[in-house]
Image (tube, rainbow, N blue to C red):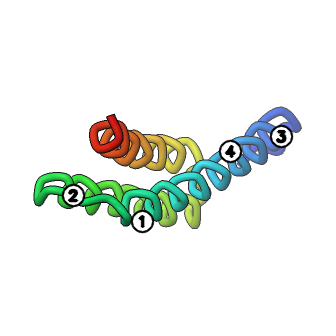
Amino acid sequence: MLSCPFIKRYTMELEDRVKRTVAIFNENVSAVAGLNLTEAEVRVVELAKMYASDTSAFIKNGDYVTAFSAIEYAHGLLDAIIKIKKG
């Protein structure tokens, strides 16, 4: 691996951003849990949780770009359910 200061700083910033987004995702999972969801919406929430689980695996492998993509996609799925339910 390269030991470029820019790459090291960028990786650290991305790692922090991924971890913050995971925390927000977990808060939104709690918010969704209190909603009366249809069967289809429950499937979407489960899919979002699977993407969040993938995020953890990517983090463990040091792949923060893919981790960020996965958690943002998961977050978007949950956000859509929240927006639909709350209007």
Image height of 66 relative to 25, above or below: above
Q: Mark 3: which secondary structure?
A: helix
Q: In front of the other: label 3 or label 2?
A: 2
Image height of 70 relative to 84, above or below: below
Name the residue rendered at 47%, 42% in the picture: 72
Q: In front of the other: label 2 or label 4?
A: 2
Neighbour tally class for label 2: few under 14, some 14-19, many 20 plus, Cα within 10 Å: some
Residue highlighted by disc 2: 37
Cβ–Cβ below 8 Å for labels 2 and 4? no
Q: In front of the other: label 3 or label 1?
A: 1
Q: In what quadrant of the picture does the C terminus appear? A: top left
Report how far apart the C-alphas of labels 1 and 4 lie in the structure: 17 Å
Neighbour tally class for label 4: few under 14, some 14-19, many 20 plus, Cα within 10 Å: some
Mark earlier in primary sequence (1, 4): 4
Q: Position of residue 75 (x, y in %)?
A: 44, 46
Residue highlighted by disc 4: 17
Mark earlier in primary sequence (2, 4): 4
In-front residue for pair 64/81: 81
Q: Mark 4: which secondary structure?
A: helix
Residue highlighted by disc 3: 9
Mark earlier in primary sequence (3, 4): 3
Q: Mark 2: which secondary structure?
A: loop
Q: Position of residue 27 (x, y in %)?
A: 54, 59
Mark earlier in primary sequence (3, 2): 3
Mark earlier in primary sequence (1, 2): 2
Mark earlier in primary sequence (3, 1): 3
Given the current orientation, which residue lies at the most extreme right position? 5
Name the kind of residue labelled 2 in the image: Leu
Neighbour tally class for label 1: few under 14, some 14-19, many 20 plus, Cα within 10 Å: some
Name the kind of residue labelled 1 in the image: Ser
Locate residue 17: give its quadrant.
top right
Neighbour tally class for label 3: few under 14, some 14-19, many 20 plus, Cα within 10 Å: few
